[in-house]
Image (spheres, rainbow, N blue to C red):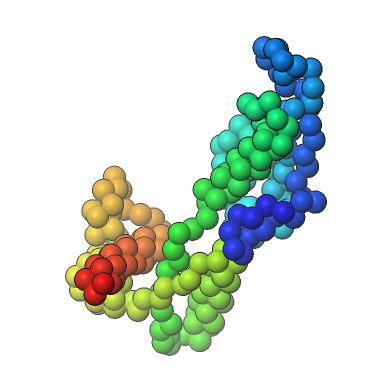
Amino acid sequence: MLYISSHIIIPDSEIDIHAMRSQGAGGQNVNKVSSAIHLQFDVAASSLPPFYKEELLKLNDHRISEEGVVTIKAQQYRSQEQNREDALARLSELIQQHQPDDVAIEDVFYAQNAKSALKLGQVRGVAMLAAAAAGRPVAEYAPLSIKSAVVGYGRAEKSQVQHMVARLLCLESLPQPSDAADALAIAICHLHTAATLARQAAAQT
């Protein structure tokens, strides 16, 4: 099994590995024995959580085919076992590139429209489930806190949030749609809060 994180484990049955002869200059039987490793991993058919699959399949990486199959060739070592470990490590690194470090979402709030509140609740549930699948804790922030952290005023309009997000992140244009600006605002709020908590923890030690 390939351990990506405490919650993400790829079973051996999903990774196709077979030995092949090394290519290139010979010497000491380097290209005469099956020491190289050819690894293939079908992203779409794997047991990876949907978030990981989507991010990997969007990559413009020569190791990932149009069909979504990762192919890794390892032959830098003379030992088949070392090349096998190298191929698995490279697959793990490729997947871990898209593992979130932190997850932050907007806290529960009261909505006048029951249907809208239900849909938002479902979306929050999916986000929290994805975070749990990735083994990441979820930070929740109230809308007032998010706007205060970004704009400096808890009742700022969406357009104000968009302009401040663009300015803080040095974007050439306003993030669109406004929901994208809201997501970036939550990330900025979390970064500020996490930094403050880290300084407080350091001061107490």
Residue 73 visible within the image: no
Residue located 58% across and 59% down the image:
5
Task: Name the residue nearer the viewer: 93 or 70.
Answer: 93
Residue located 52% across and 55% down the image:
99
Q: Answer left or right for 159 relative to 48.
A: left
Q: Quadrant of residue 153?
A: bottom left
Q: Quadrant of residue 7?
A: bottom right
Residue located 75% across and 27% down the image:
35
Q: Answer left or right for 34 relative to 178.
A: right
Query: How many dots with numbers?
Result: 0
Task: Name the residue nearer the viewer: 41 or 124.
Answer: 41
Residue 104 x, y percent position in the rendering: 42, 69
Task: Name the residue nearer the viewer: 144 or 199.
Answer: 199
Residue located 32% across and 63% down the image:
191
Residue 164 x, y percent position in the rendering: 24, 59
Q: Quadrant of residue 51?
A: bottom right
Identify the image quadrant of the C terminus. Answer: bottom left
Residue 38 visible within the image: yes
Residue 152 x, y percent position in the rendering: 19, 70
Identify the image quadrant of the N terminus. Answer: bottom right
> Furthest residue to the left?
152
Q: Answer left or right for 184 relative to 62.
A: left
Note whether 195 is above or below 92 in the view shown: below
Residue 175 x, y percent position in the rendering: 35, 54
> Furthest residue to the front?
28
Note whether 116 is above or below 178 in the view shown: below
Q: Answer left or right for 135 relative to 107.
A: right
